[in-house]
Image (cartoon, rainbow, N blue to C red):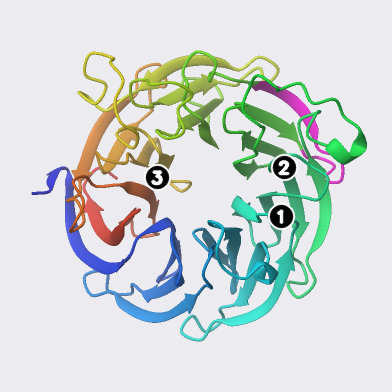
Amino acid sequence: MAQSLNTKRLAHIDCPGGGQVWVDGTTLFIGHMRQPTGTTIVDIADPKNPRVLNRIEMPVGWHSHKVRATNGIMVVNHEKQGPDGPQEFGGGLGIYDISKPAEPKLITKWRTHGKGVHRYDFDGRYAYISPTAEGYIGNIVMILDLQNPAKPEEVGRWWIPGQWKAGGEEYPWDNWTPPRCHHPIRRGNRLYVSYWHHGYYILDISDMSKPKMISGGNTSPAFPHPTHTCLPIPEPLKGRQIMVVADEDVAKLWPAAPAFTWVYDITNEQCPIPISTFQVEGVDKDGSPQPPMMGCHQPSERFNGTIIPFAWFAKGLRLIDIADPYRPKEVGFYEADAPQGHELASSNDVTIDGRGILYLIDRQRGVDIIETTVF
């Protein structure tokens, strides 16, 4: 049975599992993990009685597990998943008119080379994406201008020196995992970029055509989990600028205890310093290796004040207060039930709407709609 603290489930949407949930107004957008379901659009005007408006399907061998929507535009990723399916479908982004959410209309498909786009940020005009690109090893950082959503234009790109194979760059990672941009997030004129087993980077995008590295770091050589998301906190905490960095409890370089989240002081951007960590109590047991998907995954990219909702894989929704960034503390949780046929929950993503209601998606199946008393 589900367990909770300062939370209550309002409703459940029985739908295929997914990678991301996003709210725009009173519409919930669900990006699904596996074809044939790509994106589900749900009316949540009454969060106790969600109503499915439409579904967009994907061909075999491709998925569309990420979604962002704002200003009447929905952006979904197209990424290769396995060897089967039509290669000609191609990786990239699907860009939709959702001025009528029940009637999404494809405006265009922006194509990239190779596997496609993984994760991204979208502010209504610019998309900050992590595509594979011709001539490069792994995913890189790219900025697209969607001022005219029918004709997206690349305005800038950045990569770790050594990724541009076609440019003759020397590849220095023969004894390490290949580089892979996972997820850029914008705040002001900065991009905060997770780079999987190559750590994180802070980029200056004052000139979007020429992103410049300010600093970076990597904990994977000591803690073998990949860096999943770098979340900048907009307001200073205890007089310091703060970045929350979530590691993902998958793809471990060697057997290890579950992944956790870091809190960095980035007041001096050239020298980010980890000042604390957070792990759900009891998850790491005695520090011995455990199976994947027991620990940290993804923080909500929207949050209220200093309380950040997290999707914590097998431990469901965790509400973590970082008002004191040196001592993060849990103030609420919702431990979701495992979907039918599965031993554990696999909470993959969480977001929040303007009413303070939370939406938690399981990687295997279903979305829980949750209210909390902590906001």
Q: Mark 1 points at which residue?
A: 114
> What residue is disc 3 on?
304
Residue 112: image location, x then y, percent = 74, 59
Q: Magenta residues?
A: 205-216
Q: In which quarter of the image is the C terminus?
A: top left
Residue drawn at x 70%, y 17% is 270
Q: For the residues marked 2 and 1, what is the alpha-carbon distance in whole angstroms?
A: 12 Å
Q: In which quarter of the image is residue 190?
A: top right
Q: Residue furthest front?
A: 84
Question: Depth-wise, is mark 3 or mark 1 nearer the camera?
Answer: 1
* Numbered label attached to residue 140: 2
Dot 1 crowding, Cα within 10 Å, few <14, some 14–19, many 20+ = some
Q: Can residue 52 be seen in this view?
A: yes
Q: Which of marks 2 and 1 is in front?
A: 1
Which residue occupies 39% across, 20% down? 277
The reply to whether dot 2 and dot 1 touch (C-beta < 8 Å) is: no
Q: Which of marks 2 and 3 is in front?
A: 2
The amino acid marked with disc number 2 is Ile
